[in-house]
Image (cartoon, rainbow, N blue to C red):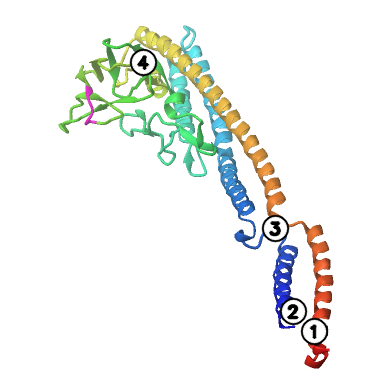
Amino acid sequence: MVNSINTIMYNLDILNDRNNKVNHGLSTNEALEYGSDDSIRYDYILGVKNDINIYTSINESINYNTAFNTSSDTALAEIKSVTESILSELIKANTDTTSDEGRVVIAGQVEDYKQSLLSLSNTSVDNQYLFSGVNTDINPFLEDETTGEISYQSDNSLKQVNVEENRYVSQGVNGIDVFYYTNNSVENTDGFTFSSNEIILDEDGNEWKLMDSNNDGTSDGLFLNGDITSSSMLVTDNGDGTFSAVNTSSRSLEIKHSIFDDLNEVISALKLEDEDGNTISKGDASVILSVTLENIDTAYDSQNISHSIVGTRTNTINTYQDIVQTKLTNLTILENEYASADLTALAVEAQALENTYSALYSTINRVNSLSLINYLK
């Protein structure tokens, strides 16, 4: 009799434990209450949930950067439009029918266009500058109040966006891409001349910066990415705002010239002045107009290329977003399949447990009603 009671109580404990798990599944819709219920299935569920968290974060990052892509495209369209207007004005100015007074008026219009380009160059969205590369908190272009020279403050980097687990792609373009164009290409051992406001890039995208390594007020070399501890290319100051050097690196170089420098030069020429304010002849002004018109047309080509690159990079990001969203959908389905309880099966089991409980308690009642005398009989 004692053994029978022990067996009944043991079975009752098993029923209670299973009933608790069934009730947990019915109330929470979770397949497992504890990882130990099914360790293999639990590990799989954790893996799926981890993947969902990763791709949810990636999807949110892409969504956050959507405004950056849209604003970059819009800003470049406006930049191109302003440059087209500048070209139109310069073509008009570079004719014999335009008077000196007319050229002065055009100079004022070009100055306004230059300020528009400067404003567009510093476009920001969500507190991120569009054309500062990875340094989105740096104002990319600044104008010297004294000289009117506009210079780039960031570097040749590109903003990166997480589009897949451990994968990033480039986003947008930087200020060098949009507002500079290649003025000269230099092979190894070739000599070249450049101005202090020009940017020198090697074929790997590194920037060779004019630096004063001795802190004596004299620029004495071109240093790789501005690192004065690295080997440099020695430079000679020509005394006219330009420097000379020999390409002693193992890479080819490109000298990048700013459209803003061309605009400063052409605005002065339209007023029959050089950039120092000295009077020049109409013939010299016409030469400057012709050259800068060509240069700005080249700058416009660079803007078109940059705009195309922005479109391509945005399409790439959008494609990855479609992939990420598809993965999230599939992972959610898997999570529901493995982590969610089968409510129908649990309901059937709950009913079966109820029947089993009834039978077991009936047995317990019969056992409790037995006396030792009846048992001996």
Residue labelled with disc 1: 367
Which structural element holds mark 3?
A: loop
The amino acid marked with disc number 4 is: Leu
Residue labelled with disc 3: 31
The amino acid marked with disc number 1 is: Val
Pointer 1 or 2: first along the chain: 2
| Image-quadrant location for residue 6 | bottom right
Name which residue lies at 54% across and 32% down. 72
Name which residue lies at 32% across and 20% down. 275
User: Viewer-nearest of labels 3 and 2?
Assistant: 2
Residue neighbourhood size for the residue with mark 2, other residues' Cα within 10 Å, grouped as few (<14), some (14–19), many (≥20): few
Q: CA distance from mark 1 to mark 3?
A: 36 Å
User: Viewer-nearest of labels 4 and 3?
Assistant: 3
Q: Are marks 1 and 2 in contact (CB under 8 Å)?
A: yes
Residue 158 is left or right of residue 164, and the answer is: left
User: Viewer-nearest of labels 4 and 1?
Assistant: 1
Residue 202 in the magenta stretch? The answer is no
The amino acid marked with disc number 2 is: Ser
Pointer 4 or 1: first along the chain: 4
Pointer 4 or 2: first along the chain: 2
In the foreground, 185 or 51: 51
Visible residue check, residue 370: no
Name which residue lies at 71% across and 78% down. 9
| Residue 289, above or below 232 | above
Residue labelled with disc 2: 4
Residue labelled with disc 4: 272
Which structural element holds mark 4?
A: loop
In the foreground, 156 or 239: 156
The magenta stretch spans which residues? 228-232
